[in-house]
Amino acid sequence: MTAPALEIVHLVKHFGGIPATQDVSLKIMPGERRLIIGPNGAGKTTLFNQITGDFRPTSGKILLFGQDVTRLTPHARAHLGLSRTYQIITLFPQDSVAHNVVLGLMGLKGARWNMFRPLGFYAELHAEARHMLDRVGLGALAEARVGEIAYGQKRRLEIAMALAQKPRLLLLDEPLAGLSSEERATIKQLIAAIPRDTTVIMIEHDMDTALDLAETVTLLHYGRVLVDGPRDAVIADPKTREVYLGH
Amino acid sequence: MRTVLLLLTAVVLASLPLFAGTFYINLASQILIAAIFALSLNLLVGYAGLTSLGHASFLGFAAYASAWASTNLGLGFAPAALLSITTTTLMAACFGLIALRATGLGFLMITLALSQVLWGLAYRWASLTNGDNGLTLAGRPAPFGIALDGAGAYYWFTLAVFAAAFTLMAVFVSSAFGSALKGTRDQPRRMAALGYNVWLIRWITFVYAGFWGGVAGLLYVYYHRYIHPTSLSITTSAEGLLGVIAGGSGTLGGPVIGAGLLVLLKNYASAYIERWNMLLGFVFLFIVLVIPEGIVPGVRRLLSRKGSGKP
Amino acid sequence: MQFWIIQTLNSLAFGGLLFLLASGFSLIFGLMRLANLAHGAFFMLGAYLGAAAIRSIPGLDLWSAALLAGFSVAAAGGLLERLVLRRLGSNPLGQVLVTLGISFIIADACLMLWGGDPIPMPAPDYLRRPILFAGIAFPAYRFAVVACAIVAALGLYLLLERTRIGAMIRAGVDDMDMARAIGIPVSKLFTAVFCLGAGIAGAGGVLGGPILSAYPGLDADMLPLALIVVILGGVGSLLGAFVGSFIIGFIYTFGTALLPDLAYVILFLPMIVVIAFRPQGLFGRLRA
């Protein structure tokens, strides 16, 4: 039996007494497409931040591909094949689009420690970045400054940076936030085309688009897992309806 | 255009002792030393986004260490220099471990506190540092048998070290590592998520900056043949920082120009007024309030505006 | 025996002075996120102003001089905050550099006005004679300084915990955006706290006069100690400033007396321990 891509065991996180994650346990298998939903403040992004290592959980365990990473730093987890995008766009606005992707590529390569070779000399890195940008349709903008490209293009760049690392587990935090319907369709295609050796976990509010991409769904509410299972079962669950429609 | 300008500068700098008087040659040596110091500090301030107010620690410590090793251990200049640079770099490694527990204002306060401790030591531990009297160096070194006692000879020596320092630091910031460093300045969390060890990158840069600060300290003590606790004071750190910010942090030319202007100002102002510290204070206010981005980025912005015709 | 008692008392008195300096620094940092590097200069300016006032106004006692200097320095601090620091609100680095520049200007102005020789300040007559108890002489003025520091600490505590302004300051230290959102007049609060911090430092300079006297370099001697106190005690914490001040007061006084060469290195040690194991300081809260 293969180890799950991600296993979360009794995860708890308090912020100064306020619980943000309450006894969350999840198991996500390699290749799975998992959607995490829940109202604002349900603790979705907090959960992501614990998976990446930005926040230390108060208690509980996180395992990546069978390895306990609860006490590992974010960069060490990245080297295990974990990649993420941000809900609030987090790019390098002063640099070129291509440079952003190069930074993503270099993060996992020994080259990042080289103090004596100018970055411009790494032709293969730049070629790879170009290739990645072509794949997400940003090839023409490679030399543009990130601060000057459109919002939707920045969203695509976020994904390109993560995909460039060829992650084994990819966390997408609201990749569709703030996009027009055409832009959403483009990103949807992009996510649908991610190869199956990458496991994808996505937080998204736009159900119409996101449910098409997901196979399994987790509903978080007040930091707890409320419903968890195959897509259709979760949609049909009365508790889902209650959270989203009820009161 | 740029290459021509650089070449021209290099020719003028290299031939300076052939046409300039002793006063100007010495002034140029001081500028080059201050420029190396400011460039090394700029690695932290401009490229790592870590504002240190304790960089004089490395200049002062290296100067003291070499003067002390020459007089008390009877070492020759080369072994004394080697010992001094090694210990300074090791000290930077230790200081980095402490100061990099914080960033932002915390980092600034810790570096300031650490350097003030060294400054206090230099004053108080008189059996080692000779206290307020400072340490005197018997003479300047004579590498490969070339005496550096003359103003011209010492200038060329300083220029050679400056060229090496400038080149190596320029390569450093444009290298793969340098790009990662700038990334940690702009988006540390993102860089960690991309697989970069942000802390280690900063620490290495801190140590490297300390190394070059030490090199500046060696040149400093050879130039003056003397070292006093003031070289470890907050004024020295602040002058370096002001040079970086006045010229433009995060640029290569900025710190050189800023440090140069400060040395000129200090030399010319001291001919007319005694109040250098007060003037320095007002220069601080002026720079921060009037040209916070620094001279080099400011001029660059003006030029590009003219060039492209855009507002 | 006499040595230990005297040094203990000196430590307490020096700790008290440090508290007068560090409490304001810590409050300003905690509320405004501003490292006021002119704080040592405020302390020195207060000392000089007090010395000058005592010399030129006949019959003025030390306490009135301290009040006078405190109010003058508070006013100067208020002007600095309103006219200069305010314009750099979104630029913390610029603010630090400006306070550094101001500290150079103040230090040099003091040197220009009052010269390079230390100006001693006498303690009030009735505190000049040591108190004799069980055959040991206790310097009375040291007690008075400790008492002043405790009174100041109590006053600050009551101000912070029991008054409306104090509640607003605490809200601002905890979460500035929230404080702004619920309608706290943050701008006035900044000026008030800056004045308060500067004033305590200025008065502290005068109270320190009989022990330290006013001399050029007093600012550079005191500022790093205040920094170490705040790093040790935790930024924005009154209790931290109090405890930190007395810890550093003891270490510095006994260090200077027992190992004069290494007094400064010994100061290092508690700071390193705290930074290594509790970077937020002994009583500081961790900020998310």
Image (spheres, coloured by chain):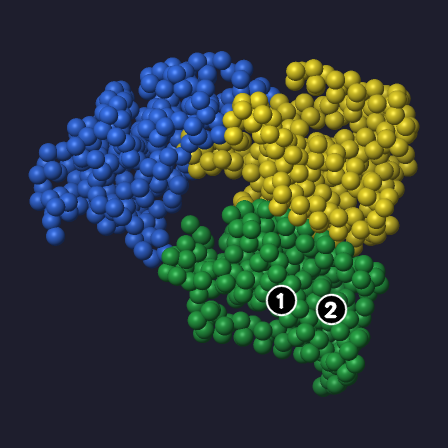
Q: Colour of chain A?
A: blue
Neighbour tally class for label 2: few under 14, some 14-19, many 20 plus, Cα within 10 Å: many
Q: Nearer the viewer, residue B183 or C282?
A: B183
Question: Is label 2 in contact with label 1 (beta carbons under 8 Å)?
Answer: no
Image point 79% across, 81% down: which residue? C58
Compare marks 2 and 1 and give the one earlier in the sequence.
Answer: 2
Residue A106 lies, with reference to residue A7, above or below; the image says: above
Q: Residue at x 37, y 22 (%)?
A: A164
Residue C20 seen in the figure: no
Q: Residue at the location (49% across, 30% down)?
A: A94
Looking at the rendered image, the quarter that the N terminus of chain C falls into is bottom right
Q: Please tell me which residue lies in front, B157 or A207.
A: A207
Q: Percent position (x, y) of residue C147?
A: 63, 78
Which label sits on residue C49?
2
Name the spot of residue A61 as percent of width and height, x first: 31, 42
In depth, the one of B72 and C281 nearer the eye is C281
Q: Is residue A152 left or right of residue C193?
A: left
Q: Chain of mark 2?
A: C
In percent of width and height, residue B97 lies at 58, 42
Name the residue tied to disc 1: C74
